[in-house]
Amino acid sequence: MKTFLFSILVFIYGTVCAQDSLKVISLSEYLGYVKAFHPIVKQANLIISESEAKLLKARGAFDPKLEIDYDTKRFKSTDYYNKLNTTFKIPTWYGIELKGTFEENDGIFLNPESTIPEDGLYSVGVSVSVARGLLTNERMAFLRQSKLYVKQAKAERQLQVNNILYQATLSYFKWLQTYNEKRLFENFLNNAQMRFDGIKKSYEVGELSAIDTTEAKMALNNRKLSLEKARIKFIKSSLELSNYLWINDNTPIELKDGVIPDVNTLENIDDALHITGMLMENINVNDHPKIQSLDYKLQSLTIEKRLQANNLLPKVDLQYNFLTQTPEIISSMNTSAYKSGINISFPLFLRKERGDLKLAKFKIQDTRFEIESTKVILKNKIDALFQELRSFLTQNKFIEDLVADTNTLLKAEERKYFLGESSLFLVNSRESKLLDTQLKSIAIETEFFNTKALLFNVLSISQDTPIY
């Protein structure tokens, strides 16, 4: 009996010392590393950068433009002509363009219409699209759509980041499960070792038969085999977890020996996943990033439809320019010297324009259908997950009772065995039943965690706030 108690004390002391050397990484801390350094998270940030670059490109359509056109011809020592035309254009939001030009032409064979005063000719004018392109045109539509693309990119980034965090969370829960299983097998191995040592001593003093030592040894080897399998599973899950661990210079890292998951994850999982106090009735699917992304897509298609509808109008461009030799004198620009023009274009059948408009309407209708179906799918998924989580609470209560009752039966069988009223076979059988029940308890807890993670993924909760 003294030897037995000494063995227990040595085991407890060794366990405490081992725990002191362990480094616990919590779910919040782990997700913080993933969010800060994982390449796919950084890649998701490029979605916003790309959309902002497209917005910059769209705004470029409204940049002022300087044009210089110089044309000359010289043949057999004769200057046929020298023509210089410089233009400064300022596009505006609507179909209006402001323009200022300077012309300077000379030469023996200059076209008569290009003849201008010797010091050149200045003009200031405006170009207006009075039908197609006045209220909306391609550059206006592109700029409006680009602004929507930036907002849509933020929603898409949120979905992408949320998905990688979800995958990382599943890996953490798998790591936690294999760690708990390894600890469980270690405890049962220690029990089997102590039982074998005790039975062996009892055999040596003649209190038990040799068959009892054989059966105790078989149980011990069986526990060793199970522990070795559990150890390998833990190593594999640790390596899988390392896929999501990087440092800031894009270097992957591996978990060192002695780093373990937080066995109290159940207490802080809601805070780590930002789902604390979340209720089904308080969830608005209209705020979901997937719905927001589709809504921005619908707004962009609406802009496209307006552009295609505008293309049904005739193209009528008017130009009017004041001409002057002395631009420094404002009064010299009057209606007595001008250059004007009109350009009219109108397809007779408008088949291309009408076809584009119909396609734009079909895309809008298709997107609206997608929005409505996505809302229903999200609502049903979230509802199902909340019901599943409530079921896990009930299952957990059942499994706790099963573990407690199975443990009680094992203790009772052990007492009967020491009193000589039972056999080692029955004790091992009870212990195996307890082991299976505790493994089932770990599996149910992992399923509960995975469902929490899936709820986090389906809700696509914003990660703008740091996790740790």
Image (cartoon, grey):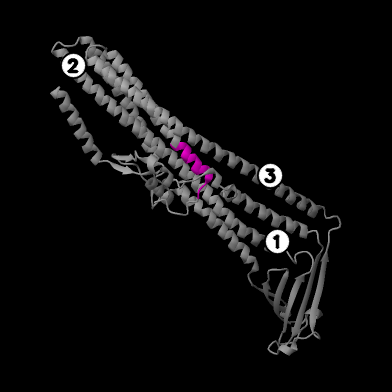
Q: Is residue 133 left or right of residue 244?
A: right
Tell me which segment is drawn in magenta: 449-461
Tell me the amino acid under the disc marked 1. Glu
* Mark toward the viewer: 2 or 1: 2
Point out the tag, 2 or 3, that comes first from the N-terminus.
2
Which residue is labeled 2 in the image?
200
* Residue at image point 39% right, 31% down: 442
Point out the tag, 2 or 1, that comes first from the N-terminus.
1
Q: How many marks?
A: 3
Residue 267 location, x and y as percent? 38, 42
Which mark is on residue 138?
1
* Residue at image point 65% right, 66% down: 61
- Kindly report the distance in space between the C-alpha atoms of the residues bearing marks 2 and 1: 90 Å
Tell me the amino acid under the disc marked 2. Lys
- Kindly report the distance in space between the C-alpha atoms of the residues bearing marks 2 and 3: 74 Å
Point out the tag, 3 or 1, that comes first from the N-terminus.
1
Q: Is residue 251 visible?
A: no
Which mark is on residue 369?
3
Instruction: Report the front residue among 375 and 304.
Output: 375
Q: Relative to 453, does residue 409 appear above or below in the rendering?
A: above
